[in-house]
Image (cartoon, rainbow, N blue to C red):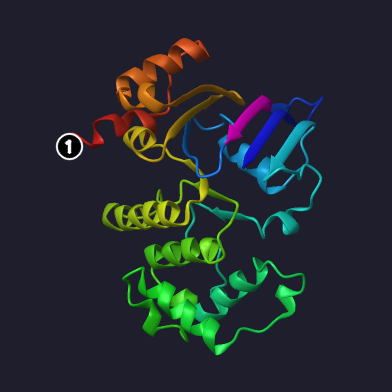
Amino acid sequence: MLELQNVYKTFNAGTVNEKKALQGVNLSLADGDFATIVGSNGAGKSTLFNAITGAFIPDEGSVILGGEDITFVPEYRRSSAIGHLFQDPLKGTAPHMTIEENLALAYLRAGRSKNAVFSRISGKDKAYFRERLALLEMGLEDRMKQPVGLLSGGQRQALTLLMATLVTPKLLLLDEHTAALDPATADKVLALTKKIVGEEHITCLMVTHNMHQALELGNRTLMMDAGRIVLDVAGGERAAMTVDGLLQRFQENAGQALDNDRILLSKVEKKN
């Protein structure tokens, strides 16, 4: 479903602020793969997502989605096939528009027909929105005429997740989408994520700083360092791996220990 071939990206090349953000990244995700990504700040995780969404064109390499080379396809055209959630719950929705209007925008934007974005939603579509909202178990199906700006952070993030998957995307990118939420709300949004991704068989990449999540969610774990994917584990090897074992493998492959406090702190979160 997704293939990155030898992708490079350098920002501010030739200046004192030069940053080699991606250095020969190769990645292949099969249809239905759910891979978690771990790495320190500056490892290249968000830059990797931006290369996929089309926020910039790589200096070298190719991005292929569903068999189509999208390396030079504009970001707005990729958005119909790629769902993207950010850490900030305020991103991804229009606060002054109603829940129904936000869902309508997402539904029409991701529509498969040529002129979908110029269409209008029907009573049947509205009933579908209400049905999908009810699955969130937050009572939002009874608040469809209310502005999104009145919702809590957790409700907005759950709504954004629904908007990103209302029309099943080819790829879903989750950039620490529960990190800004309180623990109880984060757990609920994460459970919704697992449910929707599993039921819709969506190919997914999720950035996390939680080492336990990195090993427990999905079917693959990737670790990045200095713009490279230094570890990719799956199958039996991943199932038998502990958090300490994952950190040890990272140190062996990257040549240095992981030094991100948030990630290391997550080692003991589960025990506590």
Image quarter of the N terminus:
top right
Image location (x, y in percent) of residue 267: 29, 29
Report the residue that reaches farthest toward the left. 272
Q: Quadrant of residue 133?
A: bottom left
Q: Main secondary structure of the magenta part?
A: strand
Q: Quadrant of residue 13?
A: top right
Magenta-tinted stretch = 22-29
Image location (x, y in percent) of residue 80: 67, 60
Locate residue 47 relative to residue 256 in the image: left or right. right
Of residues 107 and 124, the one nearer the viewer is 124
Q: Is residue 98 visible?
A: no
Locate residue 95 relative to residue 196 in the image: left or right. right
Magenta stretch contains residue 46: no
Of residues 154 and 213, the one nearer the viewer is 213
Looking at the image, residue 17 lies above or below residue 181: above
Locate residue 46 relative to residue 177 in the image: left or right. right
Q: Which residue sits at x=51%, y=45%?
A: 204
Image location (x, y in percent) of residue 169: 58, 56
What residue is pinned by disc 1?
A: 272
